[in-house]
Image (cartoon, rainbow, N blue to C red):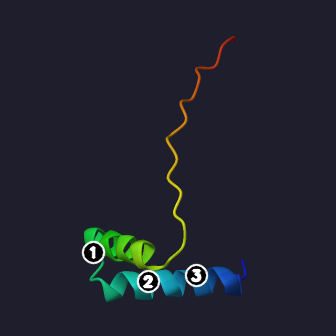
């Protein structure tokens, strides 16, 4: 299967970003939260929605 160039670019960016923070998830999240706080954009947080159980057979 042929590799999609857009997917390849996203994967490369994601790998570079993770490498920048030593693949440490806590450091990555910290950096993203700092970026959110200083970006000047409105950040919307939503409560999780509850999933209802399926009924019937």
Q: Position of residue 20 (x, y in %)?
A: 33, 88
SS for tag 3?
helix
- Residue on which the image places disc 1: 27
**In front here: 34 or 41?**
41
Between disc 3 and disc 2, whose residue precedes?
A: 3
Helix, strand or loop at mark 1: helix
Question: Could you say where residue 46 lies in the image, as x and y percent from the top left?
Answer: 52, 47
Which is nearer the N-term, disc 3 or disc 1? 3
Residue annotated with mark 2? 15
On the question of residue 3 being in view, the answer is no
Q: Which corner quadrant of the image does residue 42 belong to? A: bottom right
Which residue position is annotated with label 3? 10
In the structure shown, which secondary structural element does the residue marked by tag 2 occupy?
helix
Vertical order, 18 against 50 (above or below): below
Above/below status of 43 relative to 2: above
Callout in the foreground (2, 1): 1
Q: Residue 22 location, x and y as percent?
A: 27, 83
| Residues at marks 3 and 2 touching, judged by CB atoms closer than 8 Å | no
**For the residues carrying marks 3 and 1, which lies nearer the camera in this image?**
1
Q: Quadrant of residue 3?
A: bottom right
């Amino acid at each position: 299967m042929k590799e999609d160039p857009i997917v390849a670019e996203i994967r490369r960016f994601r790998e570079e970003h993770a490498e920048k923070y030593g693949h440490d998830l806590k450091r990555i999240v910290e950096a993203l939260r700092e970026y959110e706080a200083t970006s000047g954009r409105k950040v919307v947080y939503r409560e999780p929605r509850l999933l209802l159980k399926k009924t019937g057979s």
